[in-house]
Amino acid sequence: MARNKNVPRMLCRLVVFSMCVFITECRRTKRVIGGDEVACVLSFSKGTQIRVASLRNSSNSQHLCGATILTYNNALTAAHCVNNEPEDYYLQLNNYCNEGNHVPKATIINVVKHDQYKILSHVHDIAVLRIKLNFIGEIFDGSIIPSTSFGVSGKCTIYGYGNRDALNKGTTESLHSAEVKLISLDECTTSLGPYVAPKADSGMICAIGDGVDACQGDSGGPLICNGYIQGLSSYGLGCNVPKMPGVYTSVGAHLKWLKTICDI
């Protein structure tokens, strides 16, 4: 159910009432299914989408997860996406609109996972990447960090480079987006069941789309609401399963931690 490329899907063990007791075996990797391709923007123009990065394997340039540039020195992704050393990864931005050496990139200097992150349950699934960009400019001026964790509701947009459908195992070089709606944890629990849905103190939120979802390769990618990053794609049951929401790490719930880690 975790949605990065390095974590293979695992089969859910059948238990009473078909509930998945072993949560780690239900985690999915994910990407934006049923979404729209995001139009290219100039490499050094401002805006939300230029901040959406592809977290890649340094040895073979394979896309692994999504990430979001917060400041010139920090990026955000899901904790389950970064299990190796910082030098094993790099970020690539706006890659589908550029060629060769002109692709904006960032070296990852350090990885700071939330100290309460649990690999089995995915609670507090958030990590800060210390980065060094290979370019300069003003594209990251301003903040996309929310000022509060309260009162977030309504429609939001997810971004990702992951699979276009549940059967397509390959990721895409084109950034895609889709509209989803935030739902309450009670609604999320009704849909996913008590063993899979996040708990109130987990620092997670849920969102659901109409024929759209995140899938393999979308983990760590942003959930943007009113211009602010409110969530990070974390896990779910399958990809685009009808009436099944996705689970996202709440950025708002981790503001205090972020402020101790980042220069925000």
Image: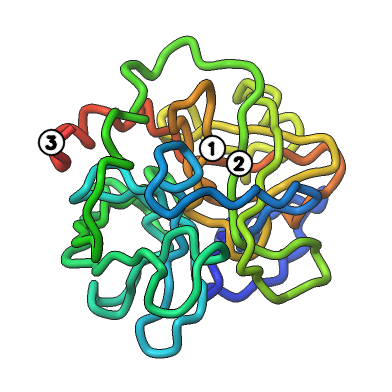
Secondary structure beneath label 3? helix
Q: Circle 3: is it few (<14), some (14-19), or many (20+) Cα within 10 Å?
A: few
Residue lying at the far top of the rendered structure: 151
Tag 3 or tag 1, which sits nearer the N-term?
1
The disc at residue 158 is 2
Of labels 2 and 3, the one closer to you = 2
Distance from disc 1 to disc 3, alpha carbons, whole Å, reads 22 Å
Mark 3 highlights which residue?
260
Distance from disc 1 to disc 2, alpha carbons, whole Å, reads 5 Å
Is any part of residue 159 visible from this angle? yes
- Where is 230 relative to 132, above or below? above
Residue at position x 17%, y 67% in the image:
109
Residue at position x 71%, y 52% in the image:
37
Mark 1 highlights which residue?
223
Secondary structure beneath label 2? strand
- Where is 166 relative to 73, above or below? below
- Where is 40 relative to 92, above or below? above
Q: Residue 181: image x %, image y %?
A: 69, 26
Q: Is residue 243 left or right of residue 160?
A: right
Residue at position x 59%, y 54% in the image:
160
Tag 1 and tag 2, C-beta contact below 8 Å? yes
Quadrant (top left, top right, bottom left, bottom right) of the C terminus: top left
Distance from disc 2 to disc 3, alpha carbons, whole Å, reads 26 Å
Is any part of residue 22 visible from this angle? no
**39 or 56: nearer the eye?**
39
Q: Residue 141: image x %, image y %?
A: 26, 34
Amino acid type, mark 1: Leu
Q: Is residue 12 left or right of residue 262?
A: right
